[in-house]
Image (spheres, grey):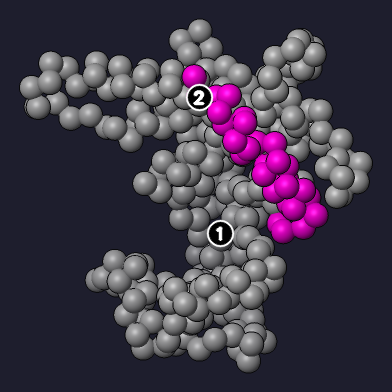
Amino acid sequence: MEYYSVVGLVLVLMVCMMKLGRMKLGHHHQLPPGPRCWPLVGNIFQIGMSSSSPHEAFAILARKHGPIMTLWLGSMCTVVISSSDVARDMFKNNDVALAGRKIYESMKGNHEYGSEGSLITSQYNEHWRMLRRLSTTEFFVTSRLDAMRDVRAKCIDRMVNLITEASGDGDGESSVDVGKFFFLMAFNLIGNLIFSKDLLDSEMERGGRFYYHAVKVMEYAGKPNVADFFPILKCLDPQGIRRNTQFHVDRAFEIARSFIKQRMENDTADSGNSKDFLDVLLQFRGDGVSGPYDFTSRTINVVVFVSPFSLVLFHNSV
């Protein structure tokens, strides 16, 4: 039995190597030069396993192979730009060709984000351009931001009070994670922009659960996933990252749906109050450029979920 297992493993490795070899040969004439790579693993050892930090490894390779180079992370081809001048030229003159984005396995789950995602998860297409126009004309306009001035002040004051309480008597011996409190403040601020309520208020139990699941999604999405580098392992999900991420995404979607359902039942858009993020999405019927257009309930769910989720991305990157 052990003999057959070894033979099976060898056959799988051979198939992976042949597939990787064909992929590289097919694209070699179209790709920039780069360092020679190992079979199957590509350049992973030159970046992640070297004595230098990844950014230092990129700098060392760039000095040898130029400001544009091709690296293989397993079977995933990556073109690295290490010059600000080259990056400016590429994204100024070839912005449409480079506007796509890779959706990693952890964020795919049972939902197809490609066509009806948010600004973060959607590919560059008419839907993405429509969301971008909507953001610039409805969400991030001066009048709407000015209307939230009092809310911003309230959230900041609450953050300062929480930091003061956490610092104790100010003897300098206790440490305070300022980033944590800043993120909590920003999450509440986004909650007011979207739902006109503090999601992390002591009486908002659903908001606390929504925050928990958003953080867990970021935790799993930020983990290196071997299935991203070796597509043959996608169906196996060996680390369970996709399954765990999907679990928390589904729970967060359930909570977002409850907020949306409550808003539709209460019909607060007709109450005379200023519109928030959710009102704009529910009332949208086209922007005069793309023609009549209604957001599906699933798209609203995705947009509502990804908005605070993008804050989690920002917090973890800092």
Residue type, label 2: Arg
The residue sitting at 66% across, 48% down in the picture is 119
Q: Quadrant of residue 145?
A: top right
Q: Magenta region, mostly helix, strand or loop? A: helix
Q: Position of residue 228 (x, y in %)?
A: 56, 61
Please tell me whether mark 2 sits on a helix, a strand or a loop: helix
- Where does the magenta region start and end? 123-150
Q: Quadrant of residue 296?
A: top right
Residue bearing the label numbered 1: 227
Seen as rendered, the residue at the extreme bottom is 29
Residue 147 falls inside the magenta stretch = yes
Q: Which mark is residue 170?
A: none
Q: Residue furthest right?
A: 292
Q: Label 1, label 2: how many angstroms apart (C-alpha)?
A: 45 Å
Residue drawn 45% across the image and 44% down it: 314
In what element is the residue under mark 1? helix
Above or below residue 129? Residue 144 is above
Q: Which mark is residue 149?
A: 2
**Number of other residues with Cα within 10 Å of mark 1, as a class: few under 14, some 14 to 19, many 20 or more:** many
Q: Amino acid at mark 1?
A: Ala
Circles 1 and 2: CB atoms closer than 8 Å: no
Q: How many marks?
A: 2
Q: Is residue 145 magenta?
A: yes
